[in-house]
Image (tube, helix red, strand yellow):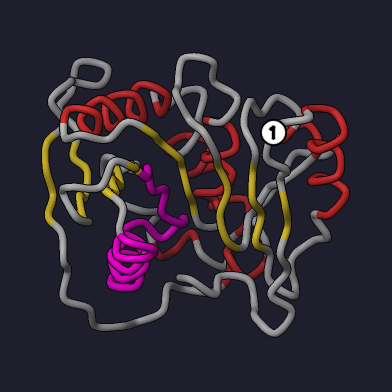
Amino acid sequence: MAAPTLSDRCCNTPAVEAVWKNLGEDKVLSTKVNGEDRKVYRTGPKDSKTGIIGVYDIFGFHPSTYQFYDRLATAHGGFQVSVPHWFKNGPPPKECFGDRPALMAWIAEHGSYSTSHFDELILAAIEDLRADGCDSFVIYGQCWGTFIAIQAAAEEKLPILAAGGPHPSMMSEEVISKVRCPIILLPAGDDMDMVPLIEKVNKEKKFSVESLQHRFENMKHGYTG
């Protein structure tokens, strides 16, 4: 099986330029991750009992990222949203975009779920949300972030009830085969067909709530970023 990779639009298109006044703020997690202080962006109503762990796209934090999670935090009555600073030293350098091998090498070094202590980072963010009154948790990503979210959904130690996100990258049967909760995939019109992946989850996992795909045919990959 070929290694999963990002779409051409991820590799060759810079983040959109936009202006947005942040509604939330950065906070340092109460628990160190691999011996280091780590930050999260927190937004949303403090009385919500549902916590969302956000995973931005490969461009890291930029105005559209903040806008996406601020607006998500106010939807359907509101959620407490925690978006970790996944890349400790910032997103990939600009010269990586347009150079797929260089970008994939950067991700392997700085954005690997298995070697970047992302499981510890997620757990620390969940524990802070729990301390602030949340009692249920989901993880929601964008593009590369959805790839991370789906991997987190396979972790027995993480109390995640659902996972997914828009314009997912790097999806495969292998990636989704170990999930322990329902997933939602929201591809753009130029993303791969993910119906077979969803059908596989529903057939093999038989969760009480079905997983689903909804394709936004008129949108291009990266439509939330």
Q: Residue at x 32, y 28 (%)?
A: 121
Q: Amino acid at mark 1?
A: Ser
Q: Which residues are magenta?
A: 52-77
Residue 222 drawn at (x, y percent): 56, 70
Q: In the displayed structure, would residue 116 be above or below residue 220?
A: above
| Frontmost residue, 113 versus 122 | 122
Residue receiving disc 1: 208
Q: Is residue 54 magenta?
A: yes
Between 34 and 140, the residue placed more toward the observer is 140
Specify the quadrant that holds the N terminus.
top right
Left or right of 131 on screen, residue 75: right
Q: Nearer the viewer, residue 223 or 89?
A: 223
Q: Write the residue at 18% across / 39% down.
A: 39
Classify residue 175 as left or right of residue 167.
right
Residue shown at the point (62%, 51%) measured from the top left: 101
Picture layout, residue 1 above or below residue 114: below
The quarter of the picture where residue 34 lies is top left
| Residue 82 placement (x, y as % from top left) | 28, 45
Q: Secondary structure at mark 1?
A: loop
Up/down of 10 relative to 107, above or below: below
Q: Is residue 102 left or right of residue 47?
A: right
